[in-house]
Image (spheres, rainbow, N blue to C red):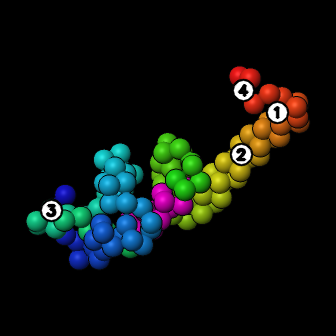
Amino acid sequence: MAASSPHAVVSISRLAAMTGVTPRALRHYEELGLIRPHRAAHGVRLFTPDQCDQAAIIALLRRCDVPLEAVREVLGEPPARREGSIRKTLQRKADELRDQLAGVTAALATTPTGARRDAA
């Protein structure tokens, strides 16, 4: 990428602080093509407000353990449809967790209460 954009306003360290994502993770997301910061002449990554929004979406979905491929799909949506896509993705994750919880709860219900601790 060329020199910095006049709209690039946030450094990677500032974006990390804003999103709770480490600079290392942000660089990883850049390597995966999920986010594309502008570069200043001296190589410093600079993020526009839109890129900050993308990073916030990535951070939200990853905190919910949404796979990176699903994150990529959300980011691929047009901005006008992105909110609905985020909600749908989070609902799928909630359904998946509800199913897992039901399985764990069923397993707990069938575990004998007097089972020996050293039995495995």
From which residue to which does the magenta span run? 51-61
Label 3, label 1: how many angstroms apart (C-alpha)?
Answer: 53 Å
| Residue 10 belongs to the span the image colors magenta | no
Label 4, label 2: how many angstroms apart (C-alpha)?
Answer: 29 Å
Q: Which residue is mark 1?
A: 107
**CB under 8 Å between discs 2 and 1:** no
Label 4, label 1: how many angstroms apart (C-alpha)?
Answer: 18 Å
The amino acid pointed to by label 1 is Ala
Report the mark closest to the observer, 2 or 1. 1
- Name the residue: 67% across, 48% down: 93
Mark closest to the chain's N terminus, 4 or 2? 2
Q: Which residue is mark 3?
A: 43
Residue 109, horizontal then vertical, whole percent: 89, 36
Mark closest to the chain's N terminus, 4 or 1? 1
Secondary structure, mark 2, is helix
Residue 118, numbered label? 4
Label 3, label 4: how many angstroms apart (C-alpha)?
Answer: 57 Å
Report the mark closest to the observer, 3 or 4. 4
Camera-side residue: 17 or 50? 17
For the C terminus, the quadrant is top right
Q: Is residue 89 left or right of residue 107?
A: left
- Name the residue: 65% across, 58% down: 87
- Name the residue: 65% across, 54% down: 90
